[in-house]
Amino acid sequence: MKSTEEIFALLKEKFGDAVLELNTKLPKEAVIEVTPLKVTDICWFLRDNEELQFDNLILLTGLDDDNGEIVKLEDGTTETKGGTLSVVYHLESMKLGHKIVLRTTTGRENPEVETVSKVWACADWHEREAYDMFGIIFLNHPDLRRILMPYDWEAGYPLRKDYKNPEFYHGMKVPY
Amino acid sequence: MLKTEQMVLNMGPQHPSTHGVLRLELELEGEIIVNVKPHLGYLHRCFEKHCEAMTYPQIIPYVDRLDYLASMNNEMGYAIAVERLLDIKVPERVEYIRVIMAELQRIASHMVAVGTYGIDIGAFTPFLYLFRDRERILTLFEKTCGARLLYNYIWVGGLSHDLPINFVNETRDFLNDFKKTVIEVNNLLSYNKIFIERTANVGVLNVESAINYGITGPNLRASGLKWDIRRNDPYSIYDRFDFEIPVGEGLHGQVGDCWDRYYLRVQEMIQSIRIVEQALDQLPEGEITSALPKRIKPVEGQLYSRVENPKGELGYFIVSKGQLQPFRVKVRPPSFINLSVLGELCKGHLIADVIAILGSIDIVLGEVDR
């Protein structure tokens, strides 16, 4: 059983710049920040290393950080420019009993994160949900489709903070 | 060898054995399953978006509607998550009442699982026996908080009502009667030759792929791993009770087959009876409202908190920005994750086995689609 600090040191030694920092500012949960395009390698290492053995991906969450700049358009509506989206991974080793939280942050305009669906099979649906709700593109995902929303939903990604309902969907009024 | 053309068959969304509105796209080679593609979202109501517009206590009635067969457990998980965020300690009596409610609800949820599984396979009678007894649990809940299914009973820091008069005796009576029902159900269904033929050696899930798919709860334990959040990451007061964690043994086939998953739920009901009996014995007197906060406004931070639901590990990931509303609530729905293994389990089996396998996973679509 290892502490988050020890695991962070191991990762930093192995991956260098791809592991950004250990964020302990927030109470309750320490978060290891990593870069979005190295996630797969880091997760393979976390799963297969003898001392770590993170065999269980508890949860994969998409997150809108809501730090973009809100721009007022001419017709009175607003639009969000810039800002970031995040993906949070809660990992656990069932054999050794330690847990960590990984987090990777990507730009809102072109949100791309590497997939971990080959590392843990359950990530497949989690990533589809994050794509569905936030529009995060998981590179090399085998089957990145919407999962909960209709396949032909064109109004955007519902859990983004700036999401607006469309007026009509297939001729049906949406806000009733 | 003669090669036939593959056929695509839709099972659902309106199919009695999909336990709700779930569409399975089956790719068939004759009657053999080549691939199963589940299509979800028919019950999607974007619970997580609703949460961002509501205060913390307002979310509790919505939490009821996730796994609507285990509302008490959902509420308990949510209340514990927010209490951990706020560092509240709830009174002893509240903890005991919560455990009693959660375990009674676990029995009720497993009754539906076991009963409807019998129906899926073609045995109607055990379902009636179990629903007769489930009604008694629901009556107990109704006497306690006024609702049969969606309770809004467990609040952050406390409960909405204390136990009604005579609750302890009535619950004991029920438990004593229910012990006999379990024996009856075992004789009628569990050890029934036809039932065993239909379920043993069907849909075998080994431990490695169960962990890899994130399977939790009875389905994981049926594959032979002793993993229960009540033991492995104890919450509330579960460390005070003496109970066993049953695991699949492959009595009539391989470990982790449909029969194991079914029978594990029967065994868990017996363990839940033991927990409720111990909790009733130890139930202390006291206040139930003393820890209720006036205003719930956690400081900035994030937290993942989990409990053992009848279906598996239910987790809440809450991000707070120091406001009255949560910034983000993400649910880890056990049914959603358990369902993702379906395609893997069905490959190579017959169409009729899809129903047996889906029933043995025990999903609730309210939670899958949220």
Image (cartoon, coloured by chain):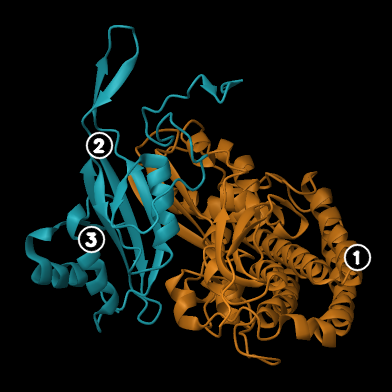
Chain colours: A cyan, B orange
Question: How far apart are the two marked residues, 3 and 1, measured between alpha carbons?
Answer: 51 Å
For the point 88% across and 76% down, which residue is it?
B181
Q: Which residue is mark 2?
A: A108
**Residue at the spot of label 3:** A39
Residue type marked 1: Leu
Dot 1: within a 10 Å radius of its alpha carbon, few (fewer than 14), some, or many (20 or more) residues?
A: few
In the foreground, B200 or B157: B200
Q: Say which of B90 and A56 sits in front.
A: A56
**Mark in the foreground, 1 or 2:** 2
Q: Measuring from the top left, give residue A117's x and y in whole percent.
A: 35, 63
Of B331 and B303, the residue lying toward us: B331
Residue B199 numbered tag: none
Residue drawn at 53 percent across, 83 percent down: B226
**SS assignment at label 1:** helix
Identity of the amino acid at label 3?
A: Val
* Nearer to the camera, B6 or A40: B6
